[in-house]
Image (cartoon, rainbow, N blue to C red):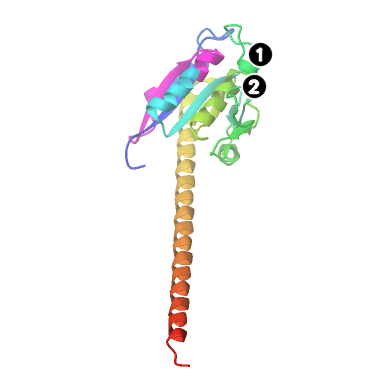
């Protein structure tokens, strides 16, 4: 990463007993803590509303063109940090705070049924487990606003997003422990993203070279055939 790039971190607004949503205060904590000199952290609060969330996320990707997005949500009754691998497109029948559900219970009409993040959550969670941290990965973000926001980010960001469920209880629910852990987690995700980009560019370069070599060989063979044909035509009978 040679110049400053944007990472968008979102949290949700008030929901049920959470008059101040911990996911939003955590996003604010990450903004204050930062992620190094090469990353600008942009934070946005999402209402617990399907239509507003869908609109805001689309606008963030279109206007900011971030490198990566990290939607945060609260995992009620959990003491774990949960890294979500997959966002689902359908099944959103539970109503939001506006007593609404999305059209046809879908995130994106015509979108694929599920989208996986480019980041390998299993690898990252394994790293923290080995360090004795309560970090796990999951493929079920819940089919409510968390899952909905995640799928929208994956869709608009070409899978460059990672939803993190933060704990509502336990030692990791304190900002003093949670924010540094999320900092390290997101930096690892960005490193993975860079590695994937490097491998993709390397493969693309190899394919391009192979294509060039094949075309060159074909042209040389064609020219050789033409030369032999002309030689036969000029030979006295």
- Seen at 49% across and 29% down, the residue is 156
Question: Helix, strand or loop at disc 2?
Answer: loop
Q: Quadrant of residue 128?
A: top right
- Seen at 33% across and 42% down, the residue is 2
Look at the image and say whether residue 40 sits in the magenta stretch: yes
Quarter of the image that includes the N terminus: top left
Q: Which residue is mark 2?
A: 143
Q: Looking at this rendering, what residue extends furthest in the front direction?
A: 237
Q: Is residue 168 visible?
A: no
Q: Give the Cα distance between marks 2 and 1.
A: 8 Å
- Viewer-side residue, 197 vs 74: 197
- Seen at 47% across and 26% down, the residue is 179
Q: Is residue 56 left or right of residue 112?
A: left
The stretch of residues the image draws in magenta is 30-54
How packed is label 1: few (under 14 Cα within 10 Å), some, or many (20 or more)?
Answer: few
- Viewer-side residue, 103 vs 85: 103
- Viewer-side residue, 215 vs 40: 215
Q: Residue 94: which disc?
A: 1
């Amino acid at each position: 990463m040679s110049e400053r790039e944007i990472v968008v971190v979102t949290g949700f607004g008030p929901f049920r007993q959470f008059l101040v949503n911990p996911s939003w205060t955590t996003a604010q904590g990450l903004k204050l803590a930062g992620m190094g000199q090469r990353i600008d952290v942009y934070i946005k609060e999402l209402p617990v509303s399907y239509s507003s969330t869908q609109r805001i996320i689309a606008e963030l990707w279109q206007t900011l063109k971030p490198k990566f997005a990290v939607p945060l949500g609260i995992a009620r009754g959990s003491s774990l940090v949960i890294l979500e691998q997959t966002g689902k497109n359908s099944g959103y029948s539970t109503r939001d705070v506006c007593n609404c559900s999305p059209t046809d219970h879908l995130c994106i009409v015509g979108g694929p049924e599920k989208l996986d993040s480019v980041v390998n959550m299993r690898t990252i969670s394994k790293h923290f487990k080995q360090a004795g941290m309560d970090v796990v990965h999951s493929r079920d973000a819940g089919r409510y606003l968390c899952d909905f926001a995640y799928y929208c980010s994956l869709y608009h960001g070409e899978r460059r997003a990672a939803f993190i469920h933060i704990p509502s209880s336990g030692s990791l629910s304190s900002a003093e422990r949670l924010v540094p852990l999320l900092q390290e987690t997101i930096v690892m995700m960005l490193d993975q993203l860079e590695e994937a980009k490097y491998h993709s560019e390397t493969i693309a370069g190899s394919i391009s070279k192979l294509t060039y070599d094949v075309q060159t060989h074909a042209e040389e063979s064609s020219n050789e055939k033409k030369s032999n044909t002309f030689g036969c035509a000029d030979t006295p009978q």
